[in-house]
Amino acid sequence: MRDFLRRIGQSFRADLAMDLGTANTLVYAKGRGIVLNEPSVVAIDTRTKQTIALGRHADRLLGRAPTHIDVLRPLKDGVIADFDAARAMIRGLLSKAFTLHFWTTPRIVIGIPSGITPVEKRAVTDAAYEAGARRIYLVEEPMAAAIGAGLDVGLPIGNMVVDVGGGTTEVAVISHYSTAYAESIRTAGDEMDEAIVRYLQRTMHLEIGLRLAADIKVRIGCAEIPDKEKSMRITGKELGGGGVKTMDLTSSQISEALEAPVDEILDTIRRAMEDTPPSLLADVRERGLVLTGGGALLAGLDVLITKMTGIEARMADDPLASVVRGCGAAIEDLDRWKRIFVS
């Protein structure tokens, strides 16, 4: 009878895992895998306070919405910056992932930055509870990324993970289900986009939006001056004159634009090497480090890290989804992974 009641109770739950990212939110459903990958954007009608678009639909409105519609990215630097917008976005994206009914009581594993403050942590859990969750489990993103990248974090061996997301870069050394070293900096993909915008303003007197900057980063961005030059034609607004200006950019120029954020990421890895216990660092030198997150896809970043640190850097098989896959592994077997949850 007890087993029957347990099975009935499970049928009314839709246990989920969520990577609530600055740029994108991914949702993993227990037994089904990744069921949602949408931009972390919400559009709200300021007259009615109603949510009118989420995810991709809202993202298309950025810079194009009428004045009575606010198009918002509720997360900044990996944490909630606008609680009401985040609550609306989380509830809306969860309803896309599964049908919300009054009887569904999902348990949710959520990845959070390792450097999150108690206030920021409370904002994440409150938003998820108000969106309909029954129970929240928090996992630090480096741990989730390591699990999602296929590392055996249960072994007493040092594993280094560098997770370059949209809002934060996380560097951690993990061994035996625990974090021996972790540092989170708020320099990642978004800061790279902003660095490109500032570079074009400073050197070419050209104003562009962040969306175009992100496209430039993806298409011709690189961590250091490449052997083979790429170029891209862009159009922006000429500063001072206000007219439209079209010009060609090269990958060498974008490498120069990205020098500061890339150096910050390299400095964070160097600090990790300095502060990690010698025995674990020896493991890392032997095994290499794993790169995860969308920002890790910057061309040449893995090669530059290897050159500057002497540690082989290799890309995870699915870097964009490493965190949500790690959280997904936890929701699939809560008893096994309970030791990694943040209180």
Image (cartoon, rainbow, N blue to C red):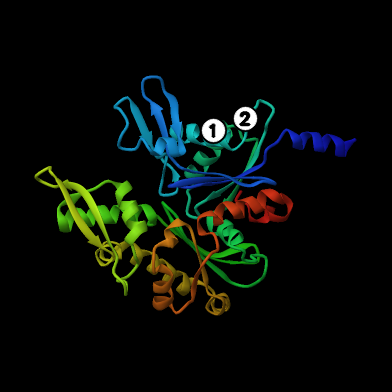
Please, what secondary structure does the residue beneath circle 2 have?
loop
**At 67% from the left edge and 33% from the top edge, which residue is drawn?**
105
Q: Circle 2 is placed at which residue position?
A: 100
Classify residue 168 by image quadrant.
Answer: bottom left
**At 86% from the left edge and 36% from the top edge, which residue is drawn?**
4
Task: Tell me the crowding category of disc 1: few under 14, some 14 to 19, or many 20 or more residues within 10 angstroms, Cα based.
Answer: many
Residue 48 point in image, percent of width and height: 40, 19
User: In the image, is residue 90 above or below residue 239?
Assistant: above
Classify residue 15 by image quadrant.
Answer: top right
> The disc labelled 2 sits on which kind of residue?
Leu
Residue sitting farthest toward the left: 241
Seen from the viewer's position, the closer of residues 174 and 166 is 166
Q: Circle 1 is placed at which residue position?
A: 91
Residue sitting farthest toward the right: 1
Residue sitting farthest toward the top: 48
**At 31% from the left edge and 55% from the top edge, which residue is drawn?**
216
Seen from the viewer's position, the closer of residues 148 and 249 is 249
The quadrant of the picture occupied by the N terminus is top right
- Disc with the residue nearer the chain's start (2 vs 1): 1
Q: How many marks?
A: 2
Q: Are marks 2 and 1 in contact (CB under 8 Å)?
A: yes
Using the image, tell me which numbered label, if any, was put on residue 197. none
Let me know if residue 82 appears in the view: no
Seen from the viewer's position, the closer of residues 324 and 186 is 324
Task: Tell me the crowding category of disc 2: few under 14, some 14 to 19, or many 20 or more residues within 10 angstroms, Cα based.
Answer: some
Let me know if residue 326 appears in the view: yes
> The disc labelled 1 sits on which kind of residue?
Arg
User: In the image, is residue 297 above or below residue 49?
Assistant: below
